[in-house]
Image (cartoon, rainbow, N blue to C red):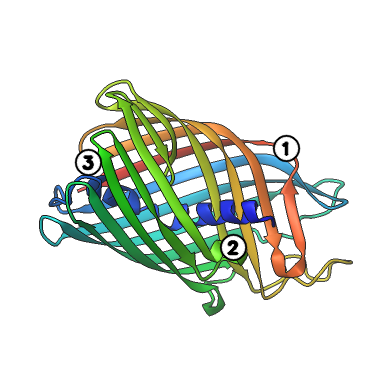
């Protein structure tokens, strides 16, 4: 995998692992205040990527599609006017569906899953400067078996946020993932949030990159970048006994997909929000780096997602 693709995969891995940071980031760009309600929130989403054929060097593979389910829970506790502590639980599962055909069978597990428990600390130093530090204990595994100790890792993130004006803020920091490989183990994190007008928002970085237009107090539309990714421990070869090809047992599978989507969000009330996204996945790749085997999607695929967020 090239350096650029390593970084892209690492960013999507980081987005998945740190999706709970979004609320904290929004709050600390100004000041840390007491959480509304009891500070408990839940996020659930279901997404699907359509069929696409895959290739590796001169080998052609059959089509595959995928479905992902994600669940997150977070509990925030205010530590005063300037700081807060948040605990997070995140679970992701991707099911791969393989199509029969005349080409070769894909040497991929049918399931990718990860679970992580995280702790974040946020603090506002003054009206312009704030920071977030966080860590997550993550277990990622590929295949039908349960979670293995070899798929256990730690993610770390440290970010400083500067509010340059009421409409513009920047963030910068670094992230580390012990499960990732190569350049994805340690990557810089840069972001920007700009509101050029009352109804427009331009965001770059984590947890979302895109342009959003707010039609009303409760409804918004946006064009956003979307992605999935992660590093998963593979204990058992998904195609044992196949003719040719390397043994894929006891290795790591790096996966990432990226694309663009039109996203609609409806805020039913202060505690309930619903989102829907439709777009295209422009690139999708699986790689067993230690076995020198890379599988790339041949063309783009349809992408759709439904999400629900509930806060108390």
Residue 219 x/y as whole percent: 31, 26
Q: Nearer the viewer, residue 268 or 251?
A: 251
Residue farthest toward the left in the current orientation of the protein: 80
**Is residue 143 in sight in this rendering?**
no
| Residue 174 location, quadrant | bottom left
Mark positioned earlier in the residue sequence (2 or 3): 2
CA neighbours of label 3 inside 10 A, class few (<14), some (14 to 19), many (20+): few
Would residue 56 be found to the left or right of residue 159 on screen? right
Q: Is residue 247 above or below residue 230?
A: below
Mark positioned earlier in the residue sequence (3 or 1): 3
Image quadrant holding the N terminus, namely bottom right
- Between tags 3 and 1, which lies in front? 1
Residue under label 1, please give it.
299
- Cα separation between marks 2 and 3: 39 Å
> Which mark, residue 183?
2
Residue drawn where x is 53% and y is 49% of the image: 68
Q: Secondary structure at mark 1?
A: loop
CA neighbours of label 2 inside 10 A, class few (<14), some (14 to 19), many (20+): some
Q: Secondary structure at mark 2?
A: helix
Residue drawn where x is 87% and y is 46% of the image: 102
**Is residue 310 in sight in this rendering?**
yes
Residue under label 3, please give it.
271
The reply to whether the C-beta atoms of the residues labelled 2 and 3 are less than 8 Å apart is no
The reply to whether the C-beta atoms of the residues labelled 1 and 2 are less than 8 Å apart is no
Would residue 270 be found to the left or right of residue 195 on screen? left
- Between tags 1 and 2, which lies in front? 2
- Cα separation between marks 1 and 2: 26 Å
């Amino acid at each position: 995998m090239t350096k650029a693709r390593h970084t892209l995969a690492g960013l999507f891995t980081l987005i998945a692992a740190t999706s709970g940071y979004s609320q904290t980031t929004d709050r600390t760009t100004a000041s840390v205040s007491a959480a509304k309600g009891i500070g408990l929130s839940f996020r659930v989403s279901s997404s699907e990527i359509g069929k696409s054929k895959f290739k590796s060097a001169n080998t052609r593979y059959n089509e595959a599609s995928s479905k992902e389910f994600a669940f997150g829970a977070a509990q925030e506790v205010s530590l005063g006017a300037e700081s807060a502590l948040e605990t997070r639980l995140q679970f992701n599962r991707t099911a791969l569906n393989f199509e029969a055909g005349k080409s070769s069978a894909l040497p991929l597990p049918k399931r990718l899953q990860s679970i992580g428990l995280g702790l974040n600390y946020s603090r506002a130093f003054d009206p312009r400067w704030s920071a977030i530090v966080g860590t997550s204990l993550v277990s990622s595994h590929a295949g039908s078996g349960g979670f293995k100790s070899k798929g256990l890792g730690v993610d770390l993130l440290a970010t400083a946020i500067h509010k340059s004006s009421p409409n513009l803020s920047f963030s910068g920091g670094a992230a580390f993932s012990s499960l990732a490989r190569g350049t994805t183990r340690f990557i810089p994190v840069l972001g920007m949030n700009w509101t050029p007008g009352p109804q427009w928002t331009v965001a770059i970085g984590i947890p979302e990159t895109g342009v959003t237009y707010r039609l009303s107090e409760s409804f918004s539309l946006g064009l956003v970048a979307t992605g999935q990714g992660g590093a998963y421990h593979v204990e058992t070869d998904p195609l044992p006994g196949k003719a040719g090809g390397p043994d894929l047992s006891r290795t790591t599978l790096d996966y990432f997909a990226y694309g663009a989507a039109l996203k609609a969000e409806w805020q039913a009330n202060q505690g309930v929000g619903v989102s829907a996204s439709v777009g295209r996945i422009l690139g999708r790749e699986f790689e067993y780096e230690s076995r020198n085997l890379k599988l790339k999607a041949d063309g783009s695929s349809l992408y759709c997602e439904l999400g629900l967020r509930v806060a108390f």
